[in-house]
């Protein structure tokens, strides 16, 4: 099975786009390992090669994902994220430990964090909602990516109107976080929740606006009507 990873790496090296290679780093403050392949091309590669392994067991596919994560290359992390989501119908309650390990040990940038959490982990939480309490533990982690993960995991469920109480509890935990990427993460979560629960999110913002970092506040109110935005911004 390692052979398929070798083939993917050759494909990625052969798919390097000069412009992508020259501009990829500018989107990140931390140093990123990358080939320089456009995201749609990475997605195409992930689909093509998944068709060769989709008959494998979940544990075999997770092992391949782990190998991809270990490389440190952002494109390989995207393929790992895609593959772990493609098999979401096979998820079992204990799988959260695997996802948590990937975030803790391998995630080192916002793009890998969001790609994994928006889809793989978010889908898992929707399937096994009793696990949402575990996100509160992530929110208290010293690891910035674990803290961001606690909120961005709930983006898609939030848009559907799910987990409002837990969203507000996680926002409480992260409220005064000094990391701008964590602030953007929970602000995005509140924005997503406002699509189904505008009044509740507006009330939350108004209650905390004197201490909520401006970055998080602006994200949270982005989809609200102008009059509510003006009130929240104190205009």
Image (cartoon, rainbow, N blue to C red):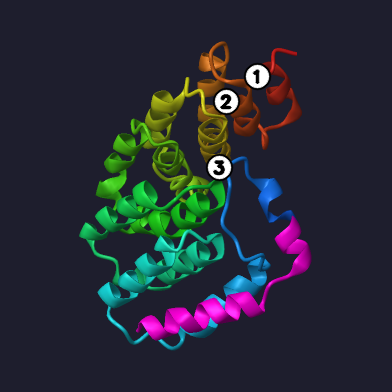
Q: Disc 2 to disc 1, how far (Cα)? A: 8 Å
Q: In terms of image quadrants, where is residue 63?
A: bottom left
Q: Viewer-proximal residue, 213 or 111?
A: 111
Q: Name the residue under label 1.
A: 232
State yes or no: residue 23 in magenta.
no
Which element is circle 3 on?
A: helix
Total label count? 3
Specify whether 182 is left or right of 97. right
Q: Name the residue under label 2.
A: 202
Q: Disc 3 to disc 2, how far (Cα)? A: 12 Å
Q: Disc 1 to disc 3, how far (Cα)? A: 17 Å
Which residues fall within the magenta stretch? 1-22
Looking at this view, name the residue that lies furthest to the right. Answer: 19
Which element is circle 1 on?
A: helix
Mark before the other along the chain sequence, 3 or 2: 3
Judge whether 167 appears above or below 22 on screen. Answer: above
Residue at x 57% of width, y 11% of height: 210
Image marks 2 and 1: residues in contact by CB distance under 8 Å: yes
CA neighbours of label 2 inside 10 A, class few (<14), some (14 to 19), many (20+): many
């Amino acid at each position: 099975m390692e052979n398929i990873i070798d083939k993917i790496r050759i494909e990625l090296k052969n798919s390097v786009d000069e412009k992508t290679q020259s501009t990829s780093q500018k989107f990140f403050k931390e140093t990123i390992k990358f080939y320089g392949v456009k995201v749609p091309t990475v997605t195409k590669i992930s689909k093509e090669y998944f068709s060769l392994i989709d008959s494998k067991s979940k544990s075999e596919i997770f092992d391949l994902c782990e190998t991809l994560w270990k490389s440190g290359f952002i494109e390989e992390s995207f393929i790992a994220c895609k593959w772990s989501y493609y098999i979401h119908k096979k998820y079992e309650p204990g799988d959260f430990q695997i996802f948590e390990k990937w975030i803790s040990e391998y995630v080192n940038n916002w793009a890998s964090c969001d790609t994994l959490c928006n889809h793989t982990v978010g889908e898992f939480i929707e399937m096994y909602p009793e696990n949402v309490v575990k996100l509160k533990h992530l929110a208290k982690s010293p690891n910035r990516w674990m803290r961001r993960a606690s909120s961005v995991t709930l983006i898609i469920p939030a848009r559907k109107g799910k987990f409002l109480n837990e969203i507000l509890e996680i926002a409480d935990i992260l409220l005064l976080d000094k990391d701008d990427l964590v602030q953007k993460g929970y602000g995005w979560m509140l924005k997503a929740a406002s699509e189904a629960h505008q009044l509740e999110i507006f009330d939350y913002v108004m209650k905390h606006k004197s201490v909520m970092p401006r970055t998080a506040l602006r994200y949270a109110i982005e989809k609200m009507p102008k009059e509510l935005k003006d009130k929240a911004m104190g205009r």
